[in-house]
Image (cartoon, helix red, strand yellow):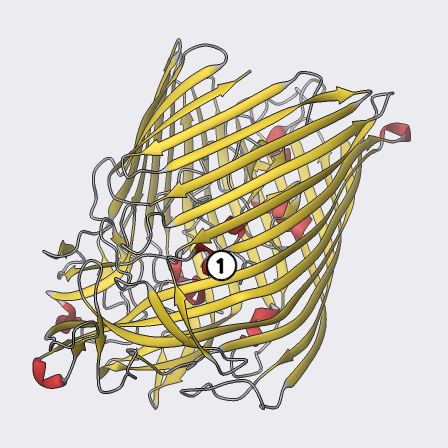
């Protein structure tokens, strides 16, 4: 479920993936090979299964997970897909976000960014994904540790021990403990993220050295507050000005007591949710993996992973919607002492899913073999997912605008300060099953021409129940008649990548990727039967590359479309900021772009990565009805996506020292559907240094937001439908933001 305000239901707009900020053909420009060298080295320009030159964990939003990686389409609310041991860490991102059960850790032996074509072939989905592999025991006993902190009081302890038991038996064990205040103090709790992940595992390797099998267990407990927001004065030209009583990124915009009252949509009972109570907001999960590798006869290789995952999934949102200015005559009073209030009033939507049981059974098996000029593989994935009565309770409340705001009472609220209980409440129940077969081949046609191609066929089954009744104030599902669904579809996908070497250093590249899907069970959460017209995503690229010992360049033009996006929008009436409505919409997106990726090594120890993208993502067939009016946004620019993107990543290594920096530029981004509001361009900047004291001990220092940008970005809440921006100039508004200036230190050691 998605909606325009930056939160889980606005995955559409909350973390927009920008177009093609990675090498355009999933090609490492440094590794395209010379013509005529195929007998000694594979043409890795075609076999790259991971993106290079990308620090995907360098995140300007938080330390919890990977940053959004740009593909030119809106992101899912769950952000970048995360895999561990070749399977997604969660089947679906809601109500269990991937970062509730996975974090970057020394207990992972390898972490990389899966290329677009690799993901399309093996998962049948379009988009980048982070793939990671659990650290397994080896003959050498190893202990790895990372201790991290920051100027805000972040504490991370990350430990792993792995080694040999005896007789070809090995072990691994790890603990990840994270207590992170982020950069603000909500008052009702010290840490905004409290996460513990524990792992244990054993491995048995065959005596003949041909294979191994591992049994792994992971326990995760994550209590994480929903996204914080920033209040500011919006200026003409897309700039923002800090308020006297609110520091962007440093102040908390949660109401000061952290208590949100809900009406349980299943039982009808009222309850108070304490955002500071880790027991109430924690997501707890258990994961068991069985995985192995084996060398078969005739040089065939087998690998497999099977997983059982269960969780008590909890989901939270606290989303600012409209802002209005009131006087004492409007009847607003402070809840805590009853004194009259005048000034800016923020309306907030709270949403809570209390510990919903979810289960997933997943598996992947693959065999492969190299035969002369071919590298073949055949695979099968199976995924079964069951959610037991997912539901989301909702309530609305008012608060003042300022740091740690106090709650307000009004004529429309009850004595506790809440109203419109369960307007837009959600529910679905059932299971999904996906069975996918795939095949790929890396074919060296000639010393000058290489083709990599793949195809997959997926069967998708979905069955369960939902409710179609409108979610009016005070709504409960008890006693309402259920509706049922029973769907199944076939999906076809494929990729083809071609490299033609004109000279030893220069050549042409081409890519085509195609995927299909019909929808997810979560689409049934709203009060209507969703439209499951097949969603098709064709992607095409054409470009050139040039390789030299000192510089490598890849440059390409691209075309990408996707149809039948489904979203539910939480809208604010442009004529009355206290009036909200939920509307459903379907639309398409088309984007064209030009990306150039450069890696330069002009002298020993120095490396420079530079990437620039020009693009124009626009909406197609976007229309809906709200507040008795028809709205249409065909050919409007997609919100939260810049037309110009740049990344600059220099680094220098000298003896035991490494100094690095990273800058990401985002040009103007539209902040509402009508394209009347926008944020001016900004930089996300990082810098740091590492010192390797010896082979066992290293130190690191990282600065986030080096330029101390004010950080406002995303959509301006409550402004989705406005057509006259003048009323927003020099007025208080809210949005999401990037992290403020911070300094992080790390201590790494292994023995």
Q: Is residue 703 above or below residue 462?
A: above
Residue extending furthest right? 297
Which part of the image, by quadrant, shows the C terminus?
top right
| Residue 32 horizontal/vertical position (percent) | 56, 27
Is 463 situated above or below 203? below
Q: Is residue 209 left or right of residue 470?
A: right
Q: State the image quarter where residue 382 is shown.
A: bottom right
Is residue 135 among what the camera can see? no
Front in this rendered view, residue 280 or 555: 280
Q: Quadrant of residue 341?
A: bottom left
Residue 367 versus residue 638: which sits nearer the camera? 367
- Secondary element at tag 1: loop
Please state which of residues 248 and 531 is positioned toward the viewer in this rendering.
248
Residue under pointer 1? 76
Q: Residue at x 28, y 78 (%)?
A: 417
* Residue 186 placement (x, y as % from top left): 28, 54
Q: Quadrant of residue 572?
A: bottom left
Q: Is residue 48 visible?
A: yes
Q: Is residue 481 left or right of residue 95?
A: right
């Amino acid at each position: 479920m998605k909606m325009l305000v930056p939160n889980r239901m606005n995955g559409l707009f909350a973390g927009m993936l920008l177009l093609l900020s990675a090498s355009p053909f999933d090609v490492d420009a440094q590794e395209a090979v010379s013509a005529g060298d195929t007998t000694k080295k594979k043409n890795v320009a075609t076999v790259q299964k991971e993106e290079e030159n990308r620090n995907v964990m360098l995140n300007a939003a938080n330390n919890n997970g990977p940053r959004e990686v740009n593909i030119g389409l809106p992101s899912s609310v769950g952000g970048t897909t995360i895999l561990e041991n070749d399977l997604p860490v969660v089947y679906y991102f809601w109500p269990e976000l991937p970062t509730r059960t996975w974090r970057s850790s020394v207990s992972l032996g390898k972490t990389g960014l899966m290329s677009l074509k690799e993901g399309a072939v093996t998962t049948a989905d379009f988009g980048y994904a982070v793939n990671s592999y659990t650290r397994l025991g080896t003959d050498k006993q190893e202990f790895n540790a990372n201790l991290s902190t920051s100027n805000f009081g972040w504490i991370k302890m990350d430990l792993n021990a792995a080694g040999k038991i005896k007789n070809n038996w090995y072990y691994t064990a790890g603990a990840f403990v994270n207590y992170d205040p982020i950069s603000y103090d909500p008052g009702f709790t010290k840490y905004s993220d409290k996460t513990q992940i524990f792992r244990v595992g054993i491995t048995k390797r065959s005596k003949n050295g041909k294979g191994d099998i591992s049994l792994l267990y992971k326990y995760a407990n994550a209590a994480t507050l929903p996204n914080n927001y920033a209040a500011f004065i919006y200026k003409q030209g897309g700039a923002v000005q800090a308020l006297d009583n609110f520091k962007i990124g440093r102040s908390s915009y949660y109401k000061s007591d952290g208590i949100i009252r809900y009406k349980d949509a299943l039982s009808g009972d009222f309850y108070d949710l304490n955002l500071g109570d880790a027991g109430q907001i924690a997501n707890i999960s258990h994961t068991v993996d069985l995985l192995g590798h084996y060398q078969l006869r005739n040089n065939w290789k087998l690998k497999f992973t099977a997983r059982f995952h269960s969780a008590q999934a909890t989901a939270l949102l606290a989303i600012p919607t409209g802002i209005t200015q009131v006087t004492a005559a409007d009847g607003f009073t402070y809840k805590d002492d009853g004194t009259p209030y005048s000034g800016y009033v923020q309306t907030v939507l709270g949403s809570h899913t209390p510990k919903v049981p979810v289960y997933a059974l997943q598996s992947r098996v693959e065999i492969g073999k190299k035969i002369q000029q071919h590298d073949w593989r055949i695979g099968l994935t199976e995924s079964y997912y069951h959610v037991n009565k997912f539901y989301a309770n909702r309530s609305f409340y008012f608060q003042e605008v300022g740091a740690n705001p106090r709650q307000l009472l009004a004529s429309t609220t009850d004595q506790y300060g809440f109203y419109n209980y369960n307007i837009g409440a959600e529910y679905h129940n059932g299971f999904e099953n996906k069975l996918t077969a795939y095949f790929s081949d890396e074919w060296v046609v000639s010393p000058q021409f290489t083709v990599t191609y793949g195809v997959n066929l997926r069967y998708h089954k979905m069955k369960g129940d939902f409710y179609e009744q409108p979610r009016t104030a005070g709504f409960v599902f008890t006693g309402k008649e259920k509706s049922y669904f029973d769907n199944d579809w076939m999906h076809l996908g494929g990729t083809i990548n071609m490299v033609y070497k004109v000279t030893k250093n220069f050549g042409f590249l081409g890519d085509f990727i195609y995927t299909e899907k019909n929808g997810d069970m979560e689409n049934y959460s709203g009060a209507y039967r969703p439209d499951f017209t097949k969603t098709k995503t064709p992607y095409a690229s054409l470009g050139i590359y040039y390789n030299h010992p000192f510089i490598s360049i890849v440059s390409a033009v691209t075309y990408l479309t996707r149809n039948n996006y489904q979203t539910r929008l939480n809208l604010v009436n442009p004529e009355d900021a206290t009036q909200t409505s939920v509307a459903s919409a379907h639309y398409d997106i088309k984007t064209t772009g030009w990306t150039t990726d450069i890696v330069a090594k002009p002298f020993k120890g120095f490396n420079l990565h530079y990437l620039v993208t020009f693009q124009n993502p626009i909406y197609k067939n976007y229309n809906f009805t709200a507040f008795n009016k028809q709205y249409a946004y065909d050919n409007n620019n997609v919100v939260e996506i810049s037309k110009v993107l740049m990344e600059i990543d220099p680094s220098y290594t000298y003896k035991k020292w490494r100094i690095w920096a990273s800058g990401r530029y985002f040009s103007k981004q539209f902040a509402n559907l009508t394209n009347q509001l926008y944020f001016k361009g900004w930089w996300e900047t990082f810098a740091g240094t590492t010192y390797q004291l010896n082979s066992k001990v290293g130190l690191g220092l990282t600065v986030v937001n080096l330029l101390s940008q004010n950080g406002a970005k995303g959509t301006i809440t409550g402004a989705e439908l406005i057509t006259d921006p003048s009323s927003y100039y020099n007025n208080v508004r809210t949005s999401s933001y990037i992290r403020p200036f911070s300094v992080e230190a790390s201590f790494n050691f292994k023995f």
